Image (tube, grey):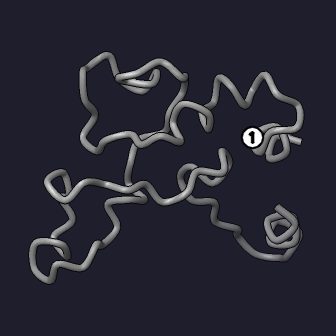
């Protein structure tokens, strides 16, 4: 978080990546659910783990992101605790820190 505060204080346009405000780490996408062309061509993991949807609540299967049974990329275990609903209620969470 200290690095983010430094980054946001520097001149220029800062970039925050999807899920960074929740402290989401790269998800572990099962092999059969990977879609990145890099995976298909080279068997390198690629960027699928950083393309998973944002969890809005702790309720599976859609975690507030979708009413469907599955999103385009699967959620992993961190969706149950690192979601908007849980962090919005916690003044010491990563999301609350970003908002301040």
Which of the image's four quarters has the N terminus? bottom right
Asked if residue 80 lies left or right of residue 39, the reply is right
How many numbered discs, if any?
Answer: 1
At x 80% / y 47%, what residue is drawn? 98
Q: Position of residue 44 (x, y in %)?
A: 24, 79
Q: Which residue is mark 1?
A: 95
Query: Image point 24% across, 41% down: which residue?
Result: 72
In this rendering, would 73 be left or right of 79? left
Residue 59 position (above or below residue 17): above
Q: Nearer the viewer, residue 80 or 91?
A: 80
Asked if 90 appears above or below 2 in the picture, the reply is: above
Picture quadrant of residue 96: top right
Camera-side residue of 61 and 3: 61
Compared to residue 24, the image places residue 42 above or below, namely below
**x, y percent for residue 46:** 30, 72
Q: Position of residue 100 (x, y in %)?
A: 89, 42
What residue is rendered at 46% in x and 21% in y?
A: 64
Q: Residues within 10 Å of mark 1 (few under 14, many from 20)?
A: many
- Tell me the element at label 1: helix
């Amino acid at each position: 978080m200290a690095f983010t505060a430094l980054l946001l204080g520097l001149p220029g346009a800062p970039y925050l990546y999807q899920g960074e405000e929740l402290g989401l780490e790269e998800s572990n996408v099962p092999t059969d659910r990977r879609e990145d062309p890099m995976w298909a061509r080279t068997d390198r993991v690629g960027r699928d783990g950083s393309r998973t949807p944002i969890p809005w609540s702790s309720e599976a299967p859609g975690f507030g992101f979708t009413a469907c049974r599955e999103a385009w990329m699967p959620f992993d275990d961190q969706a149950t605790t690192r979601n908007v609903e849980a962090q919005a209620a916690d003044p010491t969470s990563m999301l609350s820190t970003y908002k301040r």
